[in-house]
Image (cartoon, helix red, strand yellow):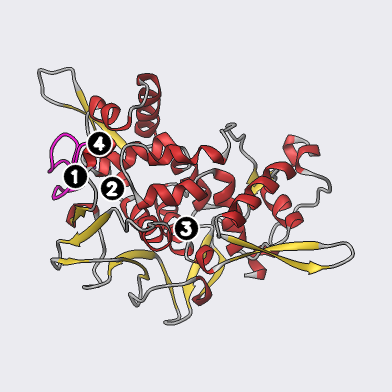
Amino acid sequence: MDALLRTSRRPYVGTPSARPASALRERNCSIARVVGILSDAWTFLIIREAFFGARRFESFRIALGLPRATLTDRLKRLTQQGIFRQHRMSETSRRTEYRLTKAGLELYPSFMAMMQFGDRWLAGAAGPPLQLIHQTCGHECRPLVSCSACLQEVTAERVNYRNGPGAGYRQAQPVRRARRASDGSQFSRGRPSSVSRTLEIIGDRWSFLIIREAFLGARRFERLMTELNIASNILTDRLTRLVATGILERRKYQSLPDRYEYRLTAMGKDLYGPLIVMLAWGDRWLSRGGPPIILTHRDCGNDFTPIVICDHCRKPIEANNMRYRMNYDPGDFGAPAVSDRAAAIWGREPER
Protein backbone atom coordinates (compact mmCIF):
# COMPACT_ATOMS: atom_id res chain seq x y z
CA MET A 1 0.00 0.00 0.00
CA ASP A 2 2.77 2.44 0.90
CA ALA A 3 4.42 1.77 -2.46
CA LEU A 4 1.25 2.87 -4.18
CA LEU A 5 1.17 6.08 -2.17
CA ARG A 6 4.81 6.92 -2.94
CA THR A 7 4.26 7.09 -6.71
CA SER A 8 4.14 10.40 -8.55
CA ARG A 9 4.46 12.69 -5.56
CA ARG A 10 3.91 16.38 -6.21
CA PRO A 11 6.93 18.68 -6.13
CA TYR A 12 4.88 21.85 -5.63
CA VAL A 13 4.89 23.32 -2.12
CA GLY A 14 1.99 25.38 -0.86
CA THR A 15 -1.73 25.17 -0.23
CA PRO A 16 -3.99 23.94 -3.03
CA SER A 17 -5.63 27.34 -3.41
CA ALA A 18 -2.22 28.98 -3.90
CA ARG A 19 -1.09 26.70 -6.71
CA PRO A 20 -1.43 27.60 -10.35
CA ALA A 21 -4.09 25.56 -12.16
CA SER A 22 -1.41 23.75 -14.19
CA ALA A 23 0.21 22.47 -10.94
CA LEU A 24 -2.94 20.82 -9.59
CA ARG A 25 -3.02 17.09 -10.12
CA GLU A 26 -5.33 14.34 -8.97
CA ARG A 27 -4.98 10.60 -8.63
CA ASN A 28 -6.27 8.47 -11.50
CA CYS A 29 -9.16 6.72 -9.81
CA SER A 30 -12.11 4.71 -11.07
CA ILE A 31 -13.98 5.38 -7.83
CA ALA A 32 -13.75 9.14 -8.38
CA ARG A 33 -15.24 8.72 -11.85
CA VAL A 34 -18.23 6.83 -10.47
CA VAL A 35 -18.60 9.34 -7.64
CA GLY A 36 -18.90 12.02 -10.31
CA ILE A 37 -22.14 10.31 -11.32
CA LEU A 38 -23.65 9.10 -8.03
CA SER A 39 -22.74 12.03 -5.76
CA ASP A 40 -25.34 14.20 -7.49
CA ALA A 41 -28.54 13.53 -5.52
CA TRP A 42 -30.91 13.97 -8.45
CA THR A 43 -28.90 11.68 -10.70
CA PHE A 44 -28.77 8.99 -8.02
CA LEU A 45 -32.53 9.23 -7.39
CA ILE A 46 -33.35 8.88 -11.08
CA ILE A 47 -31.20 5.76 -11.36
CA ARG A 48 -32.79 4.37 -8.18
CA GLU A 49 -36.30 4.86 -9.57
CA ALA A 50 -35.21 3.20 -12.82
CA PHE A 51 -34.36 0.11 -10.77
CA PHE A 52 -37.88 0.29 -9.36
CA GLY A 53 -39.19 0.24 -12.92
CA ALA A 54 -39.56 3.89 -13.94
CA ARG A 55 -39.17 4.57 -17.66
CA ARG A 56 -41.30 7.56 -18.51
CA PHE A 57 -40.55 11.20 -17.82
CA GLU A 58 -43.76 11.66 -15.82
CA SER A 59 -43.09 8.53 -13.76
CA PHE A 60 -39.74 9.95 -12.62
CA ARG A 61 -41.26 13.39 -12.01
CA ILE A 62 -44.21 12.15 -9.95
CA ALA A 63 -42.13 9.71 -7.89
CA LEU A 64 -39.44 12.26 -7.05
CA GLY A 65 -41.18 15.62 -7.27
CA LEU A 66 -38.37 17.09 -9.35
CA PRO A 67 -38.80 20.29 -11.37
CA ARG A 68 -39.14 19.54 -15.07
CA ALA A 69 -35.99 21.44 -15.98
CA THR A 70 -33.92 19.53 -13.39
CA LEU A 71 -35.27 16.18 -14.54
CA THR A 72 -34.72 17.03 -18.22
CA ASP A 73 -31.12 18.03 -17.51
CA ARG A 74 -30.31 14.86 -15.54
CA LEU A 75 -31.96 12.51 -18.04
CA LYS A 76 -30.02 14.16 -20.85
CA ARG A 77 -26.77 13.81 -18.89
CA LEU A 78 -27.42 10.15 -18.03
CA THR A 79 -28.16 9.43 -21.68
CA GLN A 80 -24.92 11.10 -22.76
CA GLN A 81 -23.03 9.07 -20.14
CA GLY A 82 -24.43 5.85 -21.57
CA ILE A 83 -26.43 4.86 -18.49
CA PHE A 84 -29.81 5.42 -20.15
CA ARG A 85 -30.92 5.12 -23.73
CA GLN A 86 -34.04 6.69 -25.20
CA HIS A 87 -36.55 4.31 -26.72
CA ARG A 88 -39.57 5.38 -28.75
CA MET A 89 -42.69 3.83 -27.25
CA SER A 90 -44.12 2.92 -30.66
CA GLU A 91 -43.42 3.57 -34.32
CA THR A 92 -46.28 6.05 -34.47
CA SER A 93 -45.61 7.80 -31.15
CA ARG A 94 -43.24 10.68 -30.49
CA ARG A 95 -43.14 9.78 -26.79
CA THR A 96 -39.99 8.15 -25.50
CA GLU A 97 -38.97 6.05 -22.54
CA TYR A 98 -35.65 6.06 -20.71
CA ARG A 99 -34.30 2.54 -20.33
CA LEU A 100 -31.20 1.45 -18.48
CA THR A 101 -28.41 0.27 -20.76
CA LYS A 102 -26.12 -2.63 -19.92
CA ALA A 103 -23.78 -0.14 -18.22
CA GLY A 104 -26.71 1.25 -16.24
CA LEU A 105 -27.91 -2.16 -15.13
CA GLU A 106 -24.40 -3.06 -14.03
CA LEU A 107 -24.56 -0.25 -11.46
CA TYR A 108 -27.00 -2.50 -9.58
CA PRO A 109 -24.30 -4.34 -7.57
CA SER A 110 -22.98 -0.96 -6.36
CA PHE A 111 -26.48 -0.10 -5.14
CA MET A 112 -26.75 -3.50 -3.42
CA ALA A 113 -23.40 -3.04 -1.68
CA MET A 114 -24.46 0.39 -0.41
CA MET A 115 -27.84 -1.03 0.60
CA GLN A 116 -26.17 -3.70 2.72
CA PHE A 117 -24.09 -1.04 4.48
CA GLY A 118 -27.19 1.05 5.14
CA ASP A 119 -29.15 -1.96 6.39
CA ARG A 120 -26.36 -2.82 8.82
CA TRP A 121 -25.54 0.62 10.18
CA LEU A 122 -28.36 3.06 9.40
CA ALA A 123 -31.70 1.21 9.40
CA GLY A 124 -32.73 2.24 12.91
CA ALA A 125 -35.63 0.80 14.87
CA ALA A 126 -37.81 0.40 11.76
CA GLY A 127 -35.37 -2.03 10.21
CA PRO A 128 -34.34 -2.33 6.54
CA PRO A 129 -36.86 -0.89 4.05
CA LEU A 130 -36.53 -3.86 1.67
CA GLN A 131 -36.11 -7.60 1.97
CA LEU A 132 -34.38 -9.07 -1.08
CA ILE A 133 -35.31 -12.38 -2.68
CA HIS A 134 -32.83 -13.95 -5.06
CA GLN A 135 -34.79 -15.68 -7.81
CA THR A 136 -31.86 -17.88 -8.79
CA CYS A 137 -32.15 -19.83 -5.53
CA GLY A 138 -35.54 -18.62 -4.28
CA HIS A 139 -34.22 -17.53 -0.88
CA GLU A 140 -34.13 -14.26 0.98
CA CYS A 141 -30.61 -13.00 0.68
CA ARG A 142 -28.02 -10.60 2.00
CA PRO A 143 -25.65 -9.23 -0.64
CA LEU A 144 -21.97 -9.96 -0.01
CA VAL A 145 -19.03 -8.19 -1.65
CA SER A 146 -16.78 -11.08 -2.56
CA CYS A 147 -13.64 -12.16 -4.38
CA SER A 148 -14.31 -13.29 -7.95
CA ALA A 149 -11.68 -16.03 -7.60
CA CYS A 150 -12.73 -17.78 -4.36
CA LEU A 151 -16.22 -16.28 -3.73
CA GLN A 152 -15.34 -15.44 -0.14
CA GLU A 153 -16.35 -12.12 1.39
CA VAL A 154 -13.56 -9.53 1.26
CA THR A 155 -12.54 -6.93 3.82
CA ALA A 156 -10.02 -4.10 3.66
CA GLU A 157 -7.60 -5.92 5.97
CA ARG A 158 -7.42 -8.96 3.65
CA VAL A 159 -6.69 -7.18 0.35
CA ASN A 160 -3.39 -5.93 -1.09
CA TYR A 161 -3.03 -3.24 -3.75
CA ARG A 162 -0.61 -2.55 -6.52
CA ASN A 163 -0.49 -0.10 -9.39
CA GLY A 164 -2.36 -1.06 -12.52
CA PRO A 165 -1.74 0.17 -16.08
CA GLY A 166 -3.88 3.24 -15.47
CA ALA A 167 -2.09 4.33 -12.28
CA GLY A 168 -0.57 7.75 -11.76
CA TYR A 169 -1.78 11.32 -11.69
CA ARG A 170 -3.38 13.65 -14.18
CA GLN A 171 -4.11 17.35 -14.29
CA ALA A 172 -7.01 18.08 -11.98
CA GLN A 173 -10.35 18.60 -13.66
CA PRO A 174 -12.54 21.58 -12.71
CA VAL A 175 -15.04 20.65 -10.00
CA ARG A 176 -18.58 21.93 -10.37
CA ARG A 177 -19.43 23.85 -7.21
CA ALA A 178 -21.99 21.88 -5.24
CA ARG A 179 -24.11 22.59 -2.20
CA ARG A 180 -22.85 21.53 1.19
CA ALA A 181 -23.19 18.00 2.47
CA SER A 182 -25.96 19.18 4.80
CA ASP A 183 -28.24 18.87 1.78
CA GLY A 184 -27.82 15.09 1.98
CA SER A 185 -31.49 14.68 2.91
CA GLN A 186 -32.27 15.18 -0.78
CA PHE A 187 -31.02 11.62 -1.37
CA SER A 188 -34.09 10.27 0.47
CA ARG A 189 -36.76 11.81 -1.71
CA GLY A 190 -39.65 9.59 -2.73
CA ARG A 191 -39.18 6.47 -0.58
CA PRO A 192 -37.08 5.14 2.33
CA SER A 193 -33.90 3.51 1.09
CA SER A 194 -30.79 2.14 2.76
CA VAL A 195 -28.80 3.26 -0.28
CA SER A 196 -30.14 6.77 0.20
CA ARG A 197 -29.24 6.73 3.88
CA THR A 198 -25.70 5.69 3.00
CA LEU A 199 -25.36 8.51 0.51
CA GLU A 200 -26.81 11.01 2.98
CA ILE A 201 -23.65 10.72 5.06
CA ILE A 202 -21.01 10.09 2.37
CA GLY A 203 -22.78 11.30 -0.75
CA ASP A 204 -20.75 14.34 -1.70
CA ARG A 205 -17.61 14.11 -3.80
CA TRP A 206 -15.19 15.24 -1.11
CA SER A 207 -16.49 12.84 1.53
CA PHE A 208 -16.16 9.93 -0.90
CA LEU A 209 -12.61 10.91 -1.79
CA ILE A 210 -11.55 11.43 1.83
CA ILE A 211 -12.76 7.90 2.60
CA ARG A 212 -10.89 6.59 -0.44
CA GLU A 213 -7.66 8.21 0.78
CA ALA A 214 -8.26 6.78 4.26
CA PHE A 215 -8.32 3.28 2.75
CA LEU A 216 -5.11 4.12 0.90
CA GLY A 217 -3.39 5.04 4.17
CA ALA A 218 -3.84 8.83 4.48
CA ARG A 219 -4.66 9.79 8.07
CA ARG A 220 -3.37 13.30 8.63
CA PHE A 221 -4.86 16.62 7.63
CA GLU A 222 -1.88 17.83 5.61
CA ARG A 223 -1.61 14.58 3.68
CA LEU A 224 -5.31 14.63 2.81
CA MET A 225 -5.14 18.25 1.73
CA THR A 226 -2.16 17.53 -0.54
CA GLU A 227 -3.55 14.35 -2.10
CA LEU A 228 -6.98 15.85 -2.81
CA ASN A 229 -6.13 19.47 -3.68
CA ILE A 230 -8.87 20.43 -1.25
CA ALA A 231 -9.27 23.76 0.54
CA SER A 232 -8.58 23.55 4.26
CA ASN A 233 -12.03 24.83 5.29
CA ILE A 234 -13.79 22.23 3.11
CA LEU A 235 -11.55 19.45 4.44
CA THR A 236 -12.22 20.55 8.02
CA ASP A 237 -15.97 20.54 7.38
CA ARG A 238 -16.00 17.06 5.80
CA LEU A 239 -13.73 15.53 8.45
CA THR A 240 -15.96 16.96 11.19
CA ARG A 241 -19.02 15.45 9.54
CA LEU A 242 -17.40 12.05 8.98
CA VAL A 243 -16.35 11.95 12.65
CA ALA A 244 -19.85 12.98 13.77
CA THR A 245 -21.48 10.22 11.69
CA GLY A 246 -19.10 7.55 12.98
CA ILE A 247 -17.14 6.90 9.77
CA LEU A 248 -13.86 8.31 11.14
CA GLU A 249 -12.44 8.75 14.61
CA ARG A 250 -10.05 11.52 15.65
CA ARG A 251 -6.92 10.43 17.55
CA LYS A 252 -4.15 12.55 19.01
CA TYR A 253 -0.72 11.56 17.74
CA GLN A 254 1.34 14.51 19.08
CA SER A 255 1.29 16.95 22.00
CA LEU A 256 2.72 20.46 22.23
CA PRO A 257 1.27 21.35 19.85
CA ASP A 258 -1.65 18.93 19.80
CA ARG A 259 -2.04 17.20 16.46
CA TYR A 260 -4.61 14.65 15.40
CA GLU A 261 -5.07 11.99 12.76
CA TYR A 262 -8.25 10.48 11.36
CA ARG A 263 -8.76 6.71 11.32
CA LEU A 264 -11.56 4.61 9.90
CA THR A 265 -13.88 3.13 12.52
CA ALA A 266 -15.44 -0.35 12.19
CA MET A 267 -18.36 1.40 10.51
CA GLY A 268 -16.02 3.26 8.18
CA LYS A 269 -14.13 0.09 7.26
CA ASP A 270 -17.44 -1.50 6.27
CA LEU A 271 -17.63 1.02 3.41
CA TYR A 272 -14.77 -0.83 1.74
CA GLY A 273 -17.13 -3.19 -0.07
CA PRO A 274 -19.26 -0.49 -1.71
CA LEU A 275 -16.16 1.48 -2.73
CA ILE A 276 -14.41 -1.42 -4.47
CA VAL A 277 -17.63 -2.46 -6.24
CA MET A 278 -17.88 1.08 -7.60
CA LEU A 279 -14.19 0.83 -8.52
CA ALA A 280 -14.91 -2.31 -10.55
CA TRP A 281 -17.74 -0.59 -12.43
CA GLY A 282 -15.55 2.42 -13.13
CA ASP A 283 -12.72 0.18 -14.32
CA ARG A 284 -15.03 -1.52 -16.79
CA TRP A 285 -16.98 1.44 -18.15
CA LEU A 286 -14.92 4.60 -17.52
CA SER A 287 -11.22 3.67 -17.35
CA ARG A 288 -9.80 4.03 -20.86
CA GLY A 289 -6.17 3.55 -19.81
CA GLY A 290 -6.73 0.34 -17.86
CA PRO A 291 -7.45 -0.06 -14.13
CA PRO A 292 -5.44 2.30 -11.91
CA ILE A 293 -5.39 -0.25 -9.06
CA ILE A 294 -5.19 -4.04 -9.06
CA LEU A 295 -6.58 -5.89 -6.05
CA THR A 296 -5.15 -9.13 -4.64
CA HIS A 297 -7.08 -11.23 -2.12
CA ARG A 298 -4.69 -12.44 0.56
CA ASP A 299 -6.88 -15.39 1.53
CA CYS A 300 -6.65 -17.09 -1.87
CA GLY A 301 -3.62 -15.29 -3.32
CA ASN A 302 -5.40 -14.27 -6.54
CA ASP A 303 -5.97 -10.95 -8.25
CA PHE A 304 -9.71 -10.41 -8.29
CA THR A 305 -12.62 -8.29 -9.42
CA PRO A 306 -15.09 -7.46 -6.64
CA ILE A 307 -18.49 -9.08 -7.24
CA VAL A 308 -21.72 -8.99 -5.25
CA ILE A 309 -23.15 -12.42 -4.53
CA CYS A 310 -26.10 -13.98 -2.70
CA ASP A 311 -25.10 -15.20 0.77
CA HIS A 312 -27.21 -18.33 0.30
CA CYS A 313 -26.26 -19.73 -3.13
CA ARG A 314 -23.03 -17.72 -3.74
CA LYS A 315 -24.23 -16.72 -7.22
CA PRO A 316 -23.85 -13.15 -8.56
CA ILE A 317 -26.66 -10.72 -7.87
CA GLU A 318 -28.03 -8.99 -10.96
CA ALA A 319 -30.95 -6.61 -11.44
CA ASN A 320 -32.95 -9.02 -13.58
CA ASN A 321 -32.93 -11.92 -11.08
CA MET A 322 -33.93 -10.07 -7.92
CA ARG A 323 -37.29 -9.45 -6.28
CA TYR A 324 -38.05 -7.71 -3.03
CA ARG A 325 -40.60 -7.25 -0.30
CA MET A 326 -41.27 -3.71 0.90
CA ASN A 327 -41.30 -3.13 4.63
CA TYR A 328 -43.11 0.19 4.12
CA ASP A 329 -46.14 1.54 2.30
CA PRO A 330 -44.82 3.49 -0.71
CA GLY A 331 -48.02 5.55 -0.70
CA ASP A 332 -46.92 7.07 2.61
CA PHE A 333 -43.98 8.63 0.75
CA GLY A 334 -45.80 9.65 -2.43
CA ALA A 335 -44.10 6.95 -4.48
CA PRO A 336 -45.70 4.14 -6.47
CA ALA A 337 -44.73 0.58 -5.52
CA VAL A 338 -43.22 0.06 -8.96
CA SER A 339 -43.30 2.76 -11.61
CA ASP A 340 -44.90 2.15 -15.03
CA ARG A 341 -45.17 -1.63 -14.85
CA ALA A 342 -43.69 -4.32 -12.67
CA ALA A 343 -41.80 -6.00 -15.50
CA ALA A 344 -39.98 -2.86 -16.60
CA ILE A 345 -36.70 -4.06 -15.11
CA TRP A 346 -37.28 -7.18 -13.09
CA GLY A 347 -37.16 -10.31 -15.22
CA ARG A 348 -36.06 -8.57 -18.41
CA GLU A 349 -32.77 -9.04 -20.21
CA PRO A 350 -30.36 -6.07 -20.19
CA GLU A 351 -30.71 -3.76 -23.14
CA ARG A 352 -27.59 -2.85 -25.07
Q: Mark 2 falls on what kind of element?
A: helix
Question: At x 57% / y 57%, what residue is drawn?
Answer: 212
Q: Pointer 1 and pointer 3: residues touching (CB < 8 Å)? A: no
Q: Nearer the viewer, mark 3 or mark 2?
A: 3
**Residue 105, position in %: x, y?**
28, 47
Question: At x 26% / y 61%, what residue is drawn?
Answer: 317
Label 3 vs 2, first from the N-terminus: 2
Q: Which mark is residue 335?
A: 4
Residue at the limit of the structure toward the right, as seen here: 256
Magenta span includes 115:
no
Name the kind of residue labelled 3 in the image.
Leu
Q: Pointer 4 and pointer 3: residues touching (CB < 8 Å)? A: no
Label 1 vs 2, first from the N-terminus: 2
Q: Which residue is mark 1?
A: 345
**Residue 43, position in %: x, y?**
40, 36
- Rounded to the nearest angstrom, the CA distance separating label 3 from label 2 is 17 Å
Q: Mark 3 falls on what kind of element?
A: helix
- Indicate the quadrant containing the N terminus: top left, top right, bottom left or bottom right: bottom right
Question: At x 11% / y 24%, what residue is drawn?
Answer: 90
Residue 82, visible in the rendered structure: no
Magenta span includes 341:
yes
217 versus 234 height, above or below = below
Name the kind of residue labelled 4 in the image.
Ala
Q: Pointer 1 and pointer 2: residues touching (CB < 8 Å)? A: yes
Q: Mark 4 falls on what kind of element?
A: loop
